[in-house]
Amino acid sequence: MEVRNSVYPSEEQMHGFLQPGPEGPIYMVNLLKFKDLAAYEDGRETHLSGKEAYQLYGAGVSQLLKEFGGGVVFSGEVSRLMLGEVENLWDEVAIAMYPSRKAMLKMMMSPTMQEIGLHRAAGLHGQLNIETTTMDFSGLKQA
């Protein structure tokens, strides 16, 4: 299995996101890998680490999520790999809930997201974004 972190979705991934998807909430699992030092696309000088730049983005996104009916479900630092193998571990994991794909898209297109997105790009070496939905276990029998 090849793992490739990215900062932006590919054209194919974005096309898939724009297709009809699950009804109701989605949960985005974010596996985050930070740059050692933030690097802004506009060339500005900074002494921020990648993590610090991403934290500026994260603070803004937390507020935006609330405005669009979602929220941060979990956020934590990766401490070790318990099972499996990967060349480089991610630095943090975050799970964000969006009431729908449509709500997420609206948030992504908002002027505020465009403003704070520069901190995300400056801080991230790359990430995996995994779209998930909840499962209904109510009909399962116990063993």
Image (cartoon, grey):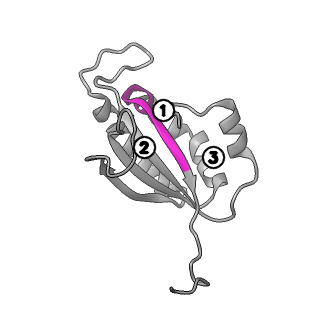
Task: Report crowding for label 3: few under 14, some 14 to 19, many 20 or more residues within 10 A (C-alpha).
Answer: few
Please report whichever mark, 3 or 2, sits nearer to the chain's N-terminal start.
2
Residues packed near mark 1 inside 10 Å, few (<14), some (14 to 19) or many (20 plus):
some
Q: Marks 1 and 3, Cα distance to the nearest angstrom?
A: 21 Å
Whichever of labels 1 and 2 marks the residue nearer the N terminus, that label is: 1
According to the image, label 3 marks what residue? 105
Is residue 99 magenta-colored? Answer: no
Q: Which residues are magenta?
A: 119-130
Residue 31 bears which disc, if any? 2
Q: Is residue 26 left or right of residue 53?
A: right
Q: Does the magenta run of residues contain 128?
A: yes
Instruction: Please name the amino acid that badge 2 sits on.
Output: Leu
- Left or right position of 10 against 94: right
Residue situated in front as seen by the camera: 42 or 96:
96
In this rendering, the answer to whether 10 lies above or below 100 is above
The answer to the question of whether label 1 and label 2 lie on touching residues, with beta carbons closer than 8 A, is yes
Give the label, 1 or 3, closer to the camera.
1
